[in-house]
């Protein structure tokens, strides 16, 4: 995946993670909250990966 692909997937994972975390919080569903937090963390990792690929100037 290239930089833009990583960043797009990161944005999607962060957004869905926030939604899941919020719904889990509102419904007191700890499992959904944990899933949301994990998905947000995955998005953050993808964002870093995309940034590194951009800095390297290639499409790894």
Image: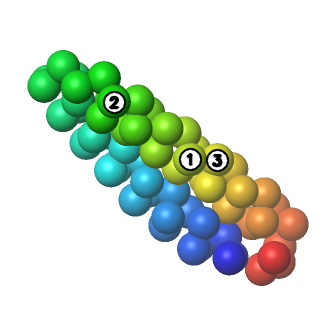
In this rendering, the label closer to the viewer, 1 or 2 = 2
From what the image shows, is residue 58 above or below residue 36?
A: below
Which of the labelled discs sits on residue 31, or is there none? Answer: 2
Tell me which colouring the rendered structure shows. rainbow
Left or right side of 51 for 5:
left
Q: Nearer the viewer, residue 13 or 55?
A: 13
Quadrant where the C terminus sits is bottom right
Whichever of callouts 3 and 2 sits on the residue coming sooner in the sequence is: 2
Outermost residue, left direction? Answer: 27
Asked if marks 1 and 3 touch (Cβ < 8 Å), the reply is yes
Q: CA distance from mark 1 to mark 3?
A: 5 Å
Quadrant for residue 12, please give it. Answer: bottom left
Question: Residue visible at 75% across and 66% down?
Answer: 54
Picture layout, residue 31 above or below residue 9: above
Residue at the (40%, 30%) spot, across then down:
34
Which residue has dot 1 on it?
42
Estimate the spatial distance between the alpha carbons at disc 3 and disc 2, rounded to whole Å.
Answer: 21 Å
- Whole-number angstrom distance, CA of label 1 to CA of label 2: 16 Å
Disc nearer the start of the sequence (1/2) = 2
Residue contact at pointers 3 and 2, CB within 8 angstroms: no
Question: What residue is pinned by disc 3?
Answer: 45
């Amino acid at each position: 995946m290239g930089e833009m692909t990583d960043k797009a997937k990161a944005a999607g994972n962060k957004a869905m993670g926030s939604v899941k975390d919020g719904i889990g919080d509102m419904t007191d569903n700890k499992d959904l909250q944990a899933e949301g937090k994990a998905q947000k963390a995955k998005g953050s990792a993808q964002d870093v990966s995309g940034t590194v690929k951009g800095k390297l100037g290639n499409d790894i």
